[in-house]
Structure formats: C-alpha cells, structure tokens
Amino acid sequence: MSPTQKQRRFIAIVAGLSLLVLGAYGTARGDDGWVPIFDGATLSGWRANPESLAAGWSVKDGAIQGKGIENRQAYLVYSANEVLSDFELKFSYRMLTDGNTGVELRARVDTTGKRVFEGYHADLGHVGIGPLILGAWDFHFATRREFPCARGTRLVIEEDGTAHAERLENHVRLVDIKKRDWNRCHIVARGNHLRFSINGTLSSEFVDGIREGRLDSGLIALQIHEKGTVVQFRDILLKQLR
C-alpha cells in the first residue's frame, strides 16, 4: 500500500470513529431507547445559565461538577434537545459538601423575573438537609400556588388548582441514601404524572391536573443553589417517550 493510500485509509478510520463518538452522545439510540447525554469528558451539549456563573460548571473525574460561586441559583441546561415532553431521565449524583441542588424539568424562562426558570424541580441535597428538599418535588411556578411535596409524598393537584397529599408506602428512607457517595436517580415524566426515585425506590410523585398553567414540555437543567455547594453528576441517560 502506498503512503497516499495509507493516509487515506487512516483518515477514513479516524472519520468513522469520530462519527461513532458523536453519535454516542445525544443522538444514537440503543434498542431500549436510552441515550447518554453527557460524554464524561466535556460539557458539549450543555450551556450555563446565567452565563456569568459558567465558571461554576466543569468536568472532573468523569462527572459534571457544579460549584456554587454566588448565593443564587445557577443552572446547566441540556441544550442538545431544547424542548422535551414525556421522557425518563437517569443519573447518579453525589454531594461533596452540604448544600441544596437538584434537576429542573420541563423548565421554561420565568418572564416574571421571580426566578431564572419556572419548572418542576426534583430536589436533592446533603443527607440531613430534610425531607422537604432531599427526595422531594419543589414547584418553581411564576404565578401559581406552590404546594409542598416532601420525600414520601404523593401529591395530586386538581383541575381547580387545589391539592391533596398522601403518604407513600415503602418510599425511600434516609438510611437508603448514601452520604458523600454516589446515589442513583430515576425520573419519569409521562403526561401530567411525574415520579422521582432514588436508589431504586420511589421517593415522591405528583399529578398536575390543573386546567391552566400546567408544564407540558420544556428544558432539563442541573441546578446548584448557593455559594460553596459542590455536587457531581454522572451516567446521565435520557429516554424520550414522545
């Protein structure tokens, strides 16, 4: 084989490998529909909001690391697919410090200025932060009433905007959540029903049946809440249901 042929073959191999790598993150689907949306090495496909706090987001030890650099909410938005409706999301997280963090779902820009986004928020934090945060749903609404949905709770918001809650049986317990170590999360957003599990056990869920103001689609964003918090996310997988 001549040098020119060898060069062409090398270029073809490299090009093929590049396509495989690009396809593996955000586009390629397995038979089960799960797609990795973090490549383990870069923040490709993600963007910081606000941009002024972008320095708080990095990749360390194969994980996305969020570090609070100011006492205000900072987000890392999955931007390869801006708008998602029904989906499942899996990821692992670990807290390296005390603090408040989580994942914003079906998020959209809050035009009232109350927050950066309004959305459904799967709340996380250090072990000991309390059941209203760790494993809870937090509602970031611009104008709607925001009901508590603590760990161990099933909340139903009715068409008229009222709500009632009940305790879940066999929900995840505090002793099931690892301190300063990796915990696995699974979120299912299907229609107006959202479920949040930690380490294989349901933590909290809600049904949003309100007539006006329900969030049917939007962004996915990682969040850090205050200065000094350090959290890591890895093994982030997405399955679109529609």
Image: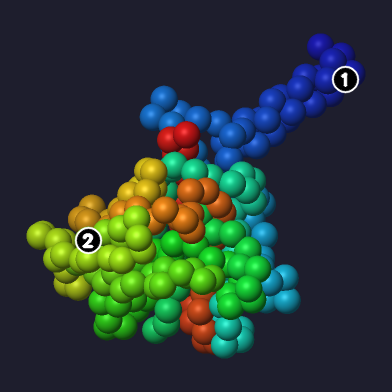
Label 2 crowd (10 A; few <14 / some 14-19 / many >=20): many
Judging from the image, what secondary structure is the residue with disc 2 in?
strand
Residue 61, given in percent of the width and then of the height, sits at 52, 63
Label ID, residue 3: 1
> At 24% from the left edge and 69% from the top edge, which residue is drawn?
151
* Residue occupied by mark 2: 154
> At 27% from the left edge and 59% from the top edge, which residue is drawn?
156
Identity of the residue furthest to the top in this view: 1
Residue type at numbered disc 2 = Arg
Q: Quadrant of the N terminus?
A: top right
Residue type at numbered disc 1 = Pro
Label 1 crowd (10 A; few <14 / some 14-19 / many >=20): few
Cβ–Cβ below 8 Å for labels 2 and 1? no
Left or right of 197 in this view: 37: right
> At 50% from the left edge and 30% from the top edge, which residue is drawn?
29
Q: Is residue 140 visible?
A: yes
Q: Earlier in the sequence, mark 2 or mark 1?
A: 1
Judging from the image, what secondary structure is the residue with disc 1 in?
helix
> At 30% from the left edge and 77% from the top edge, which residue is drawn?
132
Q: Of 85 and 129, which appears nearest the observer?
A: 85
181 over 80 or under it: above or below: below
Q: Of 60 and 107, which appears nearest the observer?
A: 107
Q: Of 63 and 33, which appears nearest the observer?
A: 33
Q: Is residue 134 visible?
A: no
Q: Of 210 and 83, which appears nearest the observer?
A: 210
